[in-house]
Image (cartoon, rainbow, N blue to C red):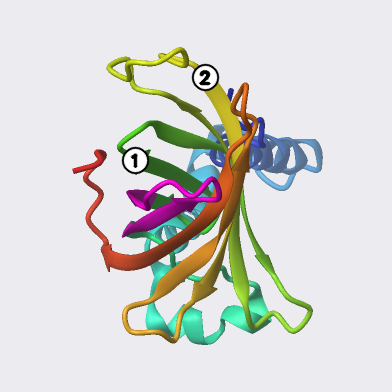
Amino acid sequence: MKAYKLNIKTIVVIVGILSLVIYSLVLVIFHIAKTEDLGETLLHYGYIIAPVSILWVMLDRYLWHTRLFQVLRKSLNIPPDLRGRWEGKLENSDGSPAQKFVIEVRQTLTSLKVHSYSAISPSLSILCEIATDTHEENFTLCFLWEGQTHTDIKDMHQGIRFQGYTMLNLLEHEKPRMLKGSYFTNFKPNQTKGGIELAWVSKEIKGKFE
């Protein structure tokens, strides 16, 4: 499964093209520009659209997590920067020993995806959001995910796909920053649940458990 969301990048391109078409029709219909001069007029219009488009890409991928925009975070509803690798432990409520647990967050201004890794199974977020309290001062990373047990697990659940939900509170003033919370799954025959505690390690995305 995967999230079904608006393709913002495609929509931006379509809106840009439609605006050029409509702009051209208006110029021709109202005799503001001659048909033979339309190309040159649209070229000047492109000089306006191109910088705006470049600025949007820069904002979505890079500028939003700079110190300037993070200072303006509350007034602009810019999300906290969670990008990178977080490592720590997962404790199952069944009393079994704690295990190493890792998540990697891929984030832009308009997209968010979480990959999770453990000795038992990897998982990938399906729906992922950042929630906040009424004062918009404390944040929680919330994601619905799907995982699959490794094929080398020697038990009856070998290769089973299952889903779960995780909620991790961001402690951004800790050194290093921390994510602490809980999870639960629909694993069968026995549902699993427990706690998670992670510390931010680096912005490097390894794409594996290690």
Residue 48 visible, this orientation: no
Picture quadrant where residue 131 is located: bottom right
Helix, strand or loop at disc 1? Answer: strand
- Tell me the kind of residue under disc 2: Arg
- Tell me the kind of residue under disc 1: Ser
Helix, strand or loop at disc 2? Answer: strand
**CA separation in Å, label 2 and label 1:** 15 Å
Name the quadrant of the N terminus: top right
Give the main secondary structure, helix, strand or loop, of the magenta stretch: strand
Expressed as whole percent of the image width and height from the top left, the position of residue 138 reads 62, 78
Expressed as whole percent of the image width and height from the top left, the position of residue 15 reads 65, 40
Tell me which segment is drawn in magenta.
86-104
Name the residue located 69 percent from the left edge and 79 percent from the top edge: 136
Instruction: Decide which of 186, 51 is in the foreground and name it.
Output: 186
Residue indicated by mark 1 = 118
Expressed as whole percent of the image width and height from the top left, the position of residue 129 reads 62, 53
Looking at the rendered structure, which numbered label has been put on residue 161?
2
Mark 2 Cα shell of 10 Å, populated few (<14), some (14-19), many (≥20)? some
Q: Residue furthest front?
A: 95
